[in-house]
């Protein structure tokens, strides 16, 4: 089992910034290369925001490139998402993800981000 707890969401004005955090806990070793962030806007499907690849590099969704940055603290099993130049279309529930191979991914409960225009 892997538990993921997000924090840091809230209401911000257009052009503002937020930093999301995800704390991962488990009774087994966690590979932080499997961590990532997804979001789901109102009436939309869940989409990739940012994640680490299997080799540890960062991968971003097209709509957030250059504005968002994913980072991590391996010692603390924490993943962060720095979001700058936020836009109204960034509004949604942001989910922390731990991907697995051959089994279902783990998801956090989500944190709401609302960008007011």
Image (tube, rainbow, N blue to C red):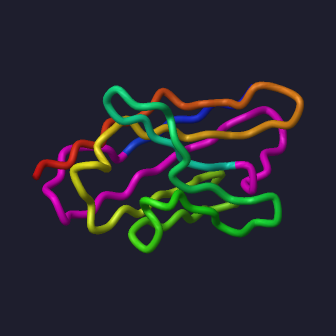
Q: Which residue occupies 28% across, 49% down? A: 89
- In depth, the one of 67 and 70 nearer the eye is 67
Residue 67 quadrant? bottom left
Q: Quadrant of the N terminus?
A: top right
- In depth, the one of 15 and 77 nearer the eye is 15
Residue 23 quadrant? top right
**Where's residue 64, x and y in %?**
43, 62
Q: Residue furthest right?
A: 102
- In depth, the one of 11 and 47 nearer the eye is 47
Q: Which residue occupies 43% across, 65% down? A: 68
Q: Which residue occupies 80% across, 36% down? A: 100
Q: Where is 54 relative to 46, above or below?
A: below
**Where's residue 42, x and y in %?**
31, 30
Q: Where is 16 relative to 115, above or below?
A: below
- In depth, the one of 84 and 72 nearer the eye is 84
**Where's residue 86, x and y in %?**
27, 60
Q: Viewed as shown, does residue 3 lie left or right of 100?
A: left
Q: How many marks?
A: 0
Residue 17 quadrant? bottom left
**Where's residue 76, x and y in %?**
63, 55
Q: Where is 1 relative to 30, above or below?
A: above
Magenta-drawn stretch contains 74: no
Q: Which residue occupies 47% across, 31% down? A: 45
Magenta highlight range:
8-34
Magenta-drawn stretch contains 32: yes
Q: Residue furthest bottom?
A: 66
Q: Viewed as shown, does residue 9 lie left or right of 14?
A: right
């Amino acid at each position: 089992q892997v538990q993921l707890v997000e924090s840091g969401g809230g209401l911000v004005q257009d052009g503002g910034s937020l930093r999301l955090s995800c704390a991962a806990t488990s009774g087994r070793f966690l590979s932080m290369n499997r961590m990532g962030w997804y979001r789901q806007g109102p009436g939309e499907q869940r989409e990739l925001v940012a994640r680490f690849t299997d080799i540890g590099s960062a991968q971003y969704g097209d709509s957030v490139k250059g504005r968002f940055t994913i980072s991590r603290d391996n010692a603390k099993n924490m993943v962060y998402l720095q979001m700058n130049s936020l836009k109204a279309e960034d509004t949604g529930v942001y989910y922390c993800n731990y991907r697995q191979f051959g089994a279902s991914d783990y998801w956090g409960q989500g944190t709401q981000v609302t960008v007011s225009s």
